[in-house]
Amino acid sequence: MKILTITEPLLAQFRAVRQQTEAICQPLMVEDYVVQPTADVSPPKWHIGHVTWFFETFVLRPYKKDYRVFNEKYPFVFNSYYEAAGARILRTNRGNLSRPSVEDIYKYRAYVDKNMEEWLSETNMTKELHDLVQIGLNHEQQHQELLLTDIKYILGNNPLFPKYKDGIEAPIAEKLTNDWLTVERGNYTIGYQDEGFYYDNEKGIHEVFLPSFQVQDRLVTNGEFIAFIEAKGYQNHEYWLSAGWAWVNKNEISAPMYWYKIENEWYYYKLSGLQKININEPLTHVNFFEADAFARWQGKRLPTEFEWEVACKQHAPIISEVANFSDEGYLHTVSQQNGDNQFYGDVWEWTNSSYLPYPYYKKVDGALGEYNGKFMIDQMVLRGGSCATPRNHIRPTYRNFFPTHSRWQFMGFRLAEYV
């Protein structure tokens, strides 16, 4: 069994990721930690407990000698969807728990951190154990993004529109590009092929044939979507898939999430408060139905996930220095900078691909096999990361996935067409 000599860097990574989660929660008031306004949104204190439970359950309990569980009842509260890990509360009930308190959950977190640091410092790290810790770290980074988007939903649906924190002044583009990026017809290799961490849903390297196509060299903007609204796009069934049209009418949708028309001007809620819409910023908080309807209105379409990956690898092989991730601290979309084609950051981009397993996909045994595989139905793939994603968490092959109606995450899109 291969022994790795990378315990100290792994310990540093562990500390950095765990500290970042607490930094995200630092601006919150204690009341903010317990709110669950909808089933998709989890209370911040549940996120804090869940990512701690993950390390306790999958690392410390099986691998740290004489480890004692902090509280035998906590796994029932903080297990998310892992059937193999035991019983759990209903997802919709996470906001009904006044106990454990926020203070107790942070004590739990400190206890697990202490034991993890001891274990990382003492363990002869095999590749298998190293990969397990990396899954835990990347899992926590996913929850950092969920924390930010859930906090935005909690505060953005408060009639007072409270600030999470004062925003950093974001750069504003004087002029956007309006070009297209071409990919020639041919066979292309899809899937993760490099060294380093990846999720199992990125593996299964295979070839796809793509006809010649082109994608927009930037994301669709707020101003372009306002034109769709003013053209009564939400009222015209011709642009909508049947399920999308039913969703629009059932929910009386007439604008993206967090948009408000006040005295004939458009405003949106940001984590820095309610502000006038910047028409040059990338559109966000739209679902697959809205993205698809806009594309049809434009006489275009959404790219497939394979087209997106190939176009990204060809036209943005390296993440731009001006790409807008959570590291920049804007926590909102930023207008196009220096001709950056915005494949990375700002918004997760809807693709026209269902979330399905790649050829040769085989989920791992045990509870961690439930991480991705069992969700491969009734969801669509998104690519590229967002303004709430850590920069070191993303890559061209990363496959995010959500149901077609979801829009509380930072979700947007770019257009595509055949040539």
Image: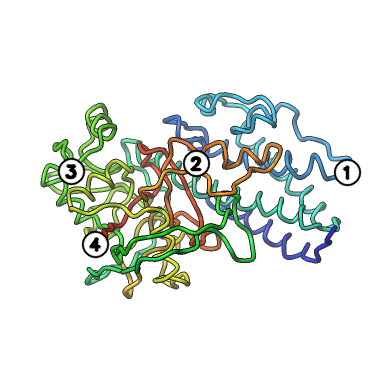
Sequence order check: which comes first, mark 4 or mark 1? Answer: 1
Q: Earlier in the sequence, mark 1 or mark 3?
A: 1
Give the label, 4 or 3, closer to the camera: 4
Identified at 12% across, 42% down, the residue is 232
Q: Which mark is residue 29?
A: 2
Which of discs 1 and 3 lies nearer the camera? The answer is: 1
Q: Give x and y (percent) for residue 396.
A: 48, 62
| Residue type of the residue flagged with mark 1 | Lys
Look at the picture and state if 337 lies above or below 264. below
Q: Residue furthest bottom?
A: 338
In this rendering, position of residue 209 left or right of residue 286: right
Q: Which residue is mark 1?
A: 65
| Residue highlighted by disc 3 | 261
**Residue 250: % across, % down:** 25, 26
Q: Amino acid at mark 3?
A: Lys
Q: Earlier in the sequence, mark 2 or mark 4?
A: 2
Q: Real-space Cα distance between discs 3 and 2?
A: 29 Å
The answer to whether the residue labelled 4 contacts the one labelled 3, judged by CB atoms less than 8 Å apart, is no
Which sits in the foreground, 284 or 154? Answer: 284
